[in-house]
Image (cartoon, grey):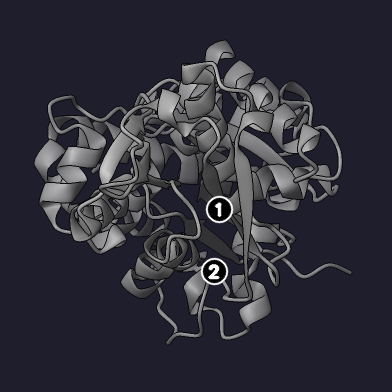
Amino acid sequence: MTTPIDTIWYSRCPSPTASSIAITGGWLQREFHGTGVDVRSLRAAEDRSVRRTHFTHPHDALFRQGGIVPPLWAAANGTATRLIGLSEIPRFQGVISLPGSGINSPADLRGRRLALPRRTTEPIDFWRAQSWRGLLNVLSIAGIGEDEVTWVDLPTDAPYHIAKPQSLDGSLWTVREASRLQTPEVLALVRGEVDAIYTYAPTGLELIDLLGAYVVASLPNIGPWVAGIGTIAALTVSQRLLDERGELVTRYVSALLEAAEWAQTHQADALRVFAAEEGVPEEWAAASYGASKALDLRPDLSPHRVASLQVEADFLFERGLVSRRVDVEEWCDETPLRLARQYMGGVADEEPLLRRDWHRHALVTQRKTA
């Protein structure tokens, strides 16, 4: 007999997502107040193997929002999850070199040494995948073939996550982890072992100033077709939770949608949340995320975003970074988003609830109160 689900867990990456707003702003706690269901961060788990499900996802009751490599890896490995939303992450991405290297434009990368980081102890090497994709995209801008550069493998046994005190609502990612993510590439660049590295996000901008580095090329901060892995965030959920407690999934997604709507009209406040989660000054967050435009954090499964994710899923498979090709359309389930919108608007739709055996029929017929 399986254990009843009375606790749901969440994890998010330190990126501009509705999850970060909903968690730090209290939307999730308010949504589940009085339901008898606990809502907890993976960081509250004492067992490190449980915390690592942020990457591997073998959890009966987990929501995850963030980078696409771990959830695609889990789906490729047959882990029972569903993709229930996608959003675009506006952030700086670029390739940098040191002064005096003679690399001043993408065309100057021909014949040069590019850093390719590799985690030797991690089952899912998201940073290698993202760096590889970003470097290849910059090469394509200059019309340079990947065989016209030298790829320098930079192995390290440093884990992505380090041991830390538990927190009921904190992110798995801390300032320490964000600051040490690129240590192997930075050291190789400073030592003259490589000529250029990929970097991204506010921490990348801070790194550029620290090194006095030159931005060889920056990728568009929006538009997955061009920018690649670094611009897409995936919202996934455990299949068992969806099957057995679909009403909880509806509540969770509705809280994210409300938080996303709030962020659109409270840009400065949202920026503070993202800067705090990445451990950087607001100045860097604003520069990375483009403070001149309102962030649209609303997840959806639009054909454009689904097709964009398929491009990246195929890249991961072709490069041997995942074990099999993931059919993104088959992985998607639009029901949670649709029911969450109905729940927010107080519109009834009995048929899908009955078909999925989702309990508490009154959930989508009641109008929410503040």
Left of 250 or right of it: where is 370? left
Any mark on residue 116, and which? none
Residue 353 screen position, x and y as percent: 67, 31
Residue 368 shows up from this direction: no
Label 2: how many Cα within 10 Å (few below 14, some 14–19, many 20+): some
Residue 246 location, quadrant:
top right
Residue 135 screen position, x and y as percent: 52, 36
Residue type marked 2: Tyr
For this rendering, which residue is in front, 257 or 195?
195
Residue type marked 1: Trp
Q: Residue furthest right?
A: 1
For this rendering, which residue is in front, 94 or 299?
94
Name the residue rendered at 70%, 42% in the picture. Answer: 72
Label 1: how many Cα within 10 Å (few below 14, some 14–19, many 20+): many
Q: Distance between the residues labelled 1 and 2?
A: 9 Å
Q: Is mark 1 on a helix, strand or loop?
A: helix
Residue 200 screen position, x and y as percent: 37, 45
User: Which image quadrant: the C terminus?
Assistant: top left
Q: How many labels does the image show?
A: 2
For this rendering, which residue is in front, 312 or 305?
312
In the image, is residue 291 above or below residue 154?
above
Left of 49 or right of it: where is 233? left
> Is label 1 in contact with label 2 (beta carbons under 8 Å)?
yes
Residue under numbered circle 2: 160
Residue 368 screen position, x and y as percent: 34, 37
Name the residue rendered at 47%, 18% in the picture. Answer: 141
Residue under numbered circle 1: 127
Residue 120 location, quadrant:
bottom right
Name the residue rendered at 42%, 56% in the picture. Answer: 32
In the image, is residue 128 above or below residue 316?
below
Residue 14 shows up from this direction: yes
Left of 243 or right of it: where is 303? left
